[in-house]
Amino acid sequence: MFNIILCLVLIFFIWIINGKFIYQGFKKKIWNEFFIHTGFGLIFTLLITEITLGPLQVWKHGDIELFKIIGYVFFAPSIYFVFTSMTMLKSKGNPIGSDRYGTTQFVDQGIYGIIRQPMTLGMALWSLALIFLFQSIFSLVLGGIEIFFFWISARMELNYNIKKFGDRYRKYAEKIPMWNFFFRKK
């Protein structure tokens, strides 16, 4: 019973805290923000639910060791992409006010010289890691939705950044891929 209450309380706080950002994205019609923060809420919901309710065997989990290893392997690039992008936006993007990542300067250096959307790619990889790690229908469904939301956010960020930074961003987007850094654009 304690695990269920803990799960519900933590999820409640996750959505209260994240709900502010989701509401702002919705209200201002900044859909990429709406989708990325909804994805954040879902990823933490999945994580908290699996950690608190998973041990109670509320639903079935696979136990394929290779999948768990693959899940752990996906965490490394996930962490790298998310934290490197956050650091670059904070240090080079000249953010204003409390939004440390709402940049006022166009950033195309470092990781942003390789892929346009490292943060959403990192979050999608994190979702994929959780799917492989937990091996449940719950994690597969919620993780799949999360990946879709992060992909939609990354796609919508293109138009948002073209409006924000103009032709310079359009030219950047023609050269630098959104997520697929293995196949560079010409």
Image (cartoon, rainbow, N blue to C red):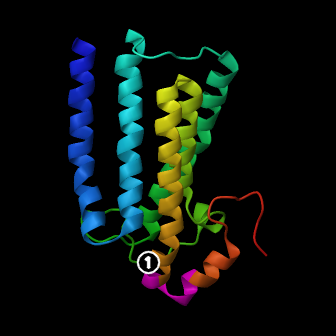
Q: Please name whichever residue, 91 or 79, is drawn nearer the observer in this view of the structure.
A: 79
Q: Please name whichever residue, 131 or 107, is drawn nearer the observer in this view of the structure.
A: 131
Residue 65 horizontal/vertical position (percent): 66, 16
Q: Which residues are magenta?
A: 163-169
Q: Does 141 sit left or right of 49 as displayed? A: right
Query: Measuring 54% from the left and 47% from the top, which residue is drawn there?
Result: 124
Residue 138 horizontal/vertical position (percent): 46, 29
Query: Measuring 62% from the left and 37% from the top, which residue is drawn there?
Result: 74
Q: Does 147 sit left or right of 58 as displayed? A: right
Residue 83 horizontal/vertical position (percent): 48, 49
Q: Does 130 sit left or right of 66 as displayed? A: left
* Amino acid type assigned to the residue bearing label 1 in the image: Gln
Residue indicated by mark 1: 105
Task: State which quarter of the image contains the N terminus.
Answer: top left
Q: For residue 168: magenta?
A: yes
Q: Please name whichever residue, 31 or 184, is drawn nearer the observer in this view of the structure.
A: 31
Q: Please name whichever residue, 27 or 100, is drawn nearer the observer in this view of the structure.
A: 27
Q: Is residue 141 above or below residue 55?
A: below
Query: Measuring 26% from the left and 18% from the top, which residue is drawn there?
Result: 4
Label the magenta part by its dominant secondary structure.
Answer: helix
Secondary structure type for disc 1? loop
